Image (tube, grey):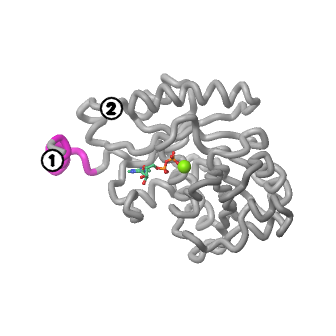
Amino acid sequence: MADKIYVGGFKGGTGATTVCVGLGLALSEAGEKTLIVDGDNIGAGAMTVAGLGNMQVYTLADYERAACRAKQTACAHPKSSNLHIMPSLGLKNTSLIERAVNEVEGLFDYVLLDRAAKSICDRAIIVTEPYLPSIKSADGSKSALFDGGIKDVSLIVNKLNGGQVISGEVLPPEKIAEILRLKLLAVIPEDPTLPIGRWRKQTVSAFKTAADSVRGLNRGLFDFLKGYSGLNGFVKRKMRERI
Ligand SMILES: Nc1ncnc2c1ncn2[C@@H]1O[C@H](COP(=O)(O)OP(=O)(O)O)[C@@H](O)[C@H]1O
Ligand SMILES: [Mg+2]
């Protein structure tokens, strides 16, 4: 049976889909057979972020009308044979996601569910930005997940800028986790190239560290302050303040 992990939270835009794809790529590179379930039945967000655009043959909408089996909807990632994405594009009855996952989970080590089917998940990762509205929403999401029966809920702080931590504009991720009383699983740095479909080396590296945490290998947190100390860091911080 796969380790089924719900990824998300109430608030949109915090980076749940990006985290699913980043973690999925890192887990699969580490040799773990990974399935991402794209819970976005209108926009196919995970398929798009993973660069699979229109590569699906079947989606869960075809499964819904019994035109294919669940396994056939899992679209292989061209760069990583261990990674598949299951698009829910066009699916009307989203409760069918649970049935589809039950059918295929035996083929995978990890199933990452992008804001989908929390009732069948073993654990959950709330993705938050280091900003107040997002942190508040993470608190509400935590209660809902606990109430829904998921006991193992941890936190990923995404879009963290080390310079903003140093200047006190945002709280350090450890503090955010402490306030929310959640285990801090990982930190992903702010990467302005992500929205245009590029992944900086340090972002890929942060996802590798995050994947290690997901696998239970305690390798610590990604060093989000690296590059923000000394004169260079000072200049970087000042330049950001002007944006
Ligand atoms: N670490 C990051 N740094 C900068 N931008 C990010 C980061 N993670 C996500 N984003 C951007 O934030 C936006 C929302 O991300 P997305 O993963 O779609 O969020 P969600 O699935 O929670 O709605 C996208 O434009 C994405 O590229
Ligand atoms: Mg999304």
Left of 229 or right of it: where is 173? right
Q: What element carries label 1?
A: helix
Q: Is mark 2 on a helix, strand or loop?
A: loop
Q: Residue 170 carries which label?
A: 2
Mark 2 beta carbon near ligand 1 (under 8 Å): no
Which residue was labeled with disc 1?
A: 239
Left of 220 or right of it: where is 34? right
Pointer 1 local density, CA inside 10 Å: few below 14, some 14–19, many at least 20: few
Identify which residue, 66 or 109, lies in the foreground: 66
Q: What residue type is labelled 1?
A: Met
Picture quadrant where residue 25 is located: bottom right
Q: Distance between the residues labelled 1 and 2?
A: 17 Å
Q: What residue type is labelled 2?
A: Val
Give the magenta-colored segment's residue range: 227-241
Identify which residue, 118 or 53, lies in the foreground: 53
- Percent x, y of residue 148: 74, 29
Instruction: Say whether residue 58 is magenta.
Output: no
Whether 184 is drawn above or below 39: the answer is: above
